[in-house]
Image (tube, rainbow, N blue to C red):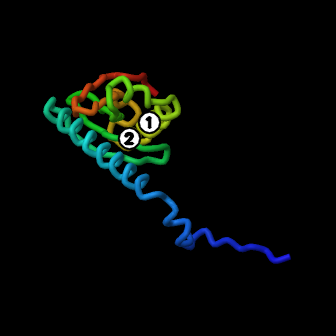
Amino acid sequence: MRQLELDFDAPPPVALRDSVPHWRKDRGRRAFLSGQAAEETVARLYEGRGARVLARRWRGISGEIDLVLRAPDTYVFCEVKRAATHDLALQRLRQGQLQRIYHAASEYIGRTPEGQLAPVRFDVATVDATGAVDILEAAFGLF
């Protein structure tokens, strides 16, 4: 009996690479771009309020944080959700995602001069289909 050897470092065969329908690739690309646009809109809104953007899509070992900002007296970790309505955007938040944000925020704060004693806040910004933004400050608790 011949044993099948798999090379996981090799690129996938052409048949597998091209098996994703074109419409699905387009939908994914649109979702990615609209997510980036939503994050940019939210970042500008925070900057207009006097916050400074420290990082966009900051990735730690535990996960990703959409926006890391410095308000005058606190670090703000903001999760940006985009959907047709603000309510639908909020429904997309899951407990596991919040836990990953907590852990990633702890990792980020550990690298700041204040360390784990730094004041933090966790916000959620929702963006609806019209581009309207709603920022919920301190939307979820501390880690």
Using the image as rendered, state which of residue 71 and residue 64 is in the foreground: 64
Tell whether 16 sits left or right of 48. Answer: right
**Discs 1, 2 touching: Cβ within 8 Å:** yes
Q: Amino acid at mark 1?
A: Ile
In the figure, 102 relative to 142: above or below? below
Using the image as rendered, state which of residue 135 and residue 143 is in the foreground: 135
Residue at point 48%, 48% (across, down): 61
* Label placed on residue 42: none
Residue at point 18%, 33% (across, down): 45
**Residue at label 1?**
101
Where does residue 31 sit, x and y in percent of width and height? 35, 45
Where does residue 32 sit, x and y in percent of width and height? 35, 48
**Label 2 secondary element:** strand
Count of labels shown? 2
Using the image as rendered, state which of residue 1 and residue 50 is in the foreground: 1
The 10 Å Cα crowd at callout 1, few under 14, some 14 to 19, many 20 or more, is many
Where does residue 36 sit, x and y in percent of width and height? 29, 46
User: Farthest residue toward the bottom?
Assistant: 2
Tell whether 16 sits left or right of 107. Answer: right
**Label 1 secondary element:** helix
Residues at marks 1 and 2, CA–CA distance in whole angstroms: 6 Å
Quadrant containing the N terminus is: bottom right
Residue at point 46%, 44% (across, down): 63
Where does residue 17 sit, x and y in percent of width and height? 51, 66
Q: Quadrant of residue 105?
A: top left
**Residue at label 2?**
65
Q: Amino acid at mark 2?
A: Ile
Residue at point 42%, 22% (across, down): 141
Mark 1 or mark 2, which has the lower sequence index? 2
Q: Quadrant of residue 134?
A: top left
The 10 Å Cα crowd at callout 2, few under 14, some 14 to 19, many 20 or more, is many
Using the image as rendered, state which of residue 33 and residue 84 is in the foreground: 84
